[in-house]
Amino acid sequence: MSPFEAVRPHLARAGSVVFVTGAGVSQESGIPTFRGRDGLWRRHDPMRLATIGAFWEDPALVWEWYEERRQNVLAARPNAGHLAVAEMEGFADVSVLTQNIDGLHQRAGSSRVVELHGSIVRTKCTSCDFAGGADVRTTQAPPRCACGALLRPDVVWFGEPLDHGVWERAARLAGGCDVMVVAGTSLEVSPANSLPAYARGNGAAIIEVNPAETALSAHADLSVRDTAAGALPGLVSEFAMMRG
Ligand code: OAD
């Protein structure tokens, strides 16, 4: 039996589906999560690597750490979970609100992706408003912008606010959906962890996909204890059966 059978009435009526995704969705592509057993924040102190203060203290260290992760991301491939999210566009109006900075949803074919925490394949200037594309050179120290200041990864660091426009868009999409699928996130980081409340405010059904329990599990309409690559293709099959 499909685990999604329990929410079929909600799926049948769903015009707009919003996915809220986190590091767990890319775990099966070989990208480590932050808080799990092998999570990055178990081995590294985020205050030394993921704050603007850390960057100014040791720009080369921070740049190299991101450079290593960037190479890992560029070598990774979307998994069955990312592909299922993209395939859902055949059956509903789909938006992806992701905390991931790896671009794998876009590479899997998702067309409306809101990157809440930025992108590791882009850089931005620490001084002017330059933000650059994916053609970042592989260097051991941060390259410089045309204006002379150091470039940094275009990601949101601890203590930094989300881009205002990005957050407004995410909150609007979450607040207008019929079904929200929250996959691969511990929901420990604000404000992304408030997105399910926006969906609830609209009367949306909330489905969680996560091998571990989270603070959302008890409140979701359905909490599927499986991985993203294991469960999400089944969600597409449900939609295909109802609407195909
Ligand atoms: P976390 O590492 O906090 O949580 C990952 C979640 O994915 C956990 O709940 C796991 O149980 C689950 N998980 C693990 N493997 C999975 C799989 N194969 N399929 C589905 N779920 C799986 O990652 P995030 O919630 O994304 O922010 O973390 C949020 C933010 O904290 C990140 O964006 C990052 C970090 O600090 C910034 O860097 C700003």
Image (spheres, rainbow, N blue to C red):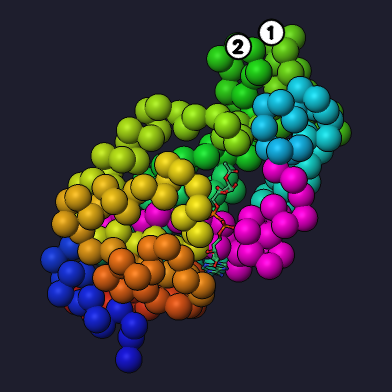
- Label 2 sits on a secondary structure element that is loop
Question: Is 103 situated left or right of 113 in this image?
Answer: right
Q: Is residue 146 left or right of residue 172?
A: right
Q: Earlier in the sequence, mark 1 or mark 2?
A: 2
- 113 is within the stretch colored magenta: no
Q: Amino acid at mark 2?
A: Cys
Contact flag, marks 1 and 2 (Cβ < 8 Å): yes
Residue visible at 17% across and 51% down in the picture? 202
Q: Is mark 2 within 8 Å of ligand 1?
A: no
Q: Is residue 27 magenta?
A: yes
From the viewer's perspective, is residue 216 above or below residue 62?
Answer: below
Q: Residue furthest top?
A: 147
The answer, for residue 155, to whether it is visible in the render is: no
* Residue occupying image coordinates x 45% and y 28%: 163
Q: At x 49% / y 59%, what residue is drawn?
A: 185
What segment carries the magenta color?
17-46
Residue 28, disc: none
x, y percent for residue 63: 77, 34
User: In the rendered image, which quarter contains the N terminus?
Assistant: bottom left
Front residue of 213/139: it is 213
Q: Quadrant of the C terminus?
A: bottom left
48 is higher (above) or lower (below) than 12: above
Type of residue at label 1? Answer: Cys
User: Badge 1: how crowded within 10 Å, few (<14), some, or many (20+)?
Assistant: few
Q: How far from the left and from the top, in percent, is residue 17?
A: 27, 57
Q: Position of residue 174 (x, y in %)?
A: 28, 47
Q: In this figure, which residue is indicated by the disc labeled 2?
A: 128
Tell me the residue that label 1 is attached to: 147
In screen coordinates, is 150 left or right of 196?
Answer: right
Closest to the observer: 105 or 101? 101
